[in-house]
Image (tube, rainbow, N blue to C red):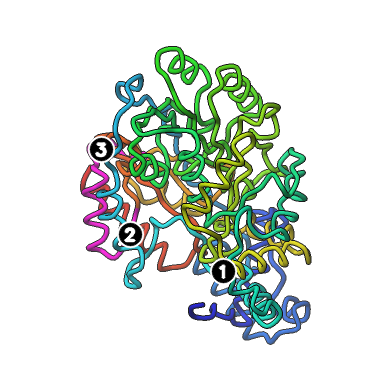
Amino acid sequence: MGALAHKPKLYEQVAERLGDAIAAGTLRPGDRLPSVRQLSLRERVSISTVLQAYLHLESIGLIETRPQSGHYVRRRERPRLAEPQVSRPAASATPVPVTVSALVARVYRSAHEPRLVQLGAAWPAPELLPVKRLHRELNALTREAGDAGIGYDLPPGCLELRQQLARRSLDWGCSLAPEDFVTTCGASEAVHLCLLAVARTGDTIAIESPAYYGTLQAIESLGLRALEIPSSPRHGMEPDALLAALERRRVAAVLVVPSFSNPVGSCMPEEHRKRIVQMLAERDIPLIEDDIYGDLHFGPERPRTCKSFDTTGNVMLCGSFSKTLAPGFRVGYVAPGRFRDRVELLKFSHTVATGTLPQLTIARFLQEGGYDRHLRALRRRLAAQVERMAEAVAEFFPEGTRVARPSGSSLLWVELPPRVDALALHAKALEAGVSIAPGPIFSARPDSYRNFVRLSCGHPWTPRIEGAMSTLGSLARSLA
């Protein structure tokens, strides 16, 4: 199960509560914080613990100390950078074979090196997740499940989990039943199974541009071709551009991440989702919807899924708990609509079953409550971290840099000045102890997005991360 998560010290717990209040807007820039003695009484901790908490918050840039006055939420008045332009993939009307895996492997060999500051990997830090509670549930189930815990949980998968997914589908704008779901080994397998179900070797899949490198690898592994569709950094895949592509080319399926796409963080407006669902239904073209980031919205409401507008079973909805609860559990799911029987058969032939105990653990966590409360805290933390990272880009990176403005997830898509080569920056950053994700791994065409990088905001802000951002900015300036 790996090492146990670091238990926060008392001052870190106090600092975290104040940090959450700042992220949520309860404490706003310029607000005066309680005096050391007041906070000591309120939190029932020692004065030295409060002082350590304030020093920690000051070190990560959330508060400032004013002599003879006290502690205040720090005002941030750095310039807000412009967003990248709408992507215009070169020769976007031409599907191309995908050959990105070798480059991805080269980039991600560094993902587990402890000496590196990990700004490239898109998974949340353990301290943001309910690790202890999940371990308790898993330990209890290990004792209770008996032989069932080590047996195959054959497709469609864990009934208890599928029941909880059906309940949660109401939040997605759907009304799905347990039998509508097949559980999978993460969202990656869900997407892979959907592609297998609807496409054959040589077929074309329409995707966003830029696109998640895992999507590109799946397309490559199946011998498919990618058709990159122009996409807005704010609103995702452009419906008019997709329609134009469909009128010129035969497409086997469209694969999108409508809610907080990876790497850009765009969120497709509801009217665009509805239009695309209708457009594809009229042409009998399946829509594969990857909703892995849907629960990580920063706004007051979760975006409706494309599946919520589906009346023909044409939308294949994929998701997982890897970004919100437990990446290592590899618990995902798919609601494949009219392709359900085909997907269930492929699941059995592909991996036989999803791990039994991880599924049961997630199901129990959802059933016993606390998931929504956990999500609210996680979203506040991620929103604050994304904002802090964007401020660091504005502070440290060269003039002419642009940055996307995601309204959910934990990623930042950064456009550097044209002369900055992302692969060269990646190599220099590794030498300096920093890992990033360079833009070319997010396109089927290796010459695309040469001056872009994706940064992960999944770890709490620390002086070490601030130092890494300063180093990264300095390297980018030298290349510019």
Q: Position of residue 52 (x, y in %)?
A: 58, 80
Dot 3 falls on a residue whose secondary structure is: loop
Q: Is residue 20 above or below residue 318?
A: below
Residue wearing tag 1: 57
The residue type indicated by label 2 comes to: Ser
Asked whether, in this view, residue 303 is left or right of residue 223, the answer is right
Q: Mark 3 vs mark 2: give the one in front.
A: 3
Q: Mark 2 vs mark 1: give the one in front.
A: 2
The residue type indicated by label 3 comes to: Pro
Q: Is residue 301 above or below residue 161?
A: above
Q: In terms of sequence position, does the residue under pointer 2 or pointer 1 come before the other?
A: 1
At a point 77% along the width and 81% down the height, the residue shown is: 41
Q: Position of residue 364 (x, y in %)?
A: 73, 67
Q: Position of residue 105 (x, y in %)?
A: 28, 55
Dot 1 falls on a residue whose secondary structure is: helix
Residue wearing tag 3: 446
The Cα–Cα distance between marks 3 and 2, rounded to whole angstroms, is 20 Å
Q: In terms of sequence position, does the residue under pointer 3 or pointer 2 come before the other?
A: 2
Asked whether, in this view, residue 303 is left or right of residue 389, the answer is right
Q: What is the number of the mark on residue 435?
A: 2
The residue type indicated by label 1 comes to: Leu
Q: Mark 1 vs mark 3: give the one in front.
A: 3
* Along the line of sight, the residue nearer the viewer: 49 or 273: 273
Which quadrant of the figure has residue 20? bottom right
**Which residues fall within the magenta stretch?**
415-436
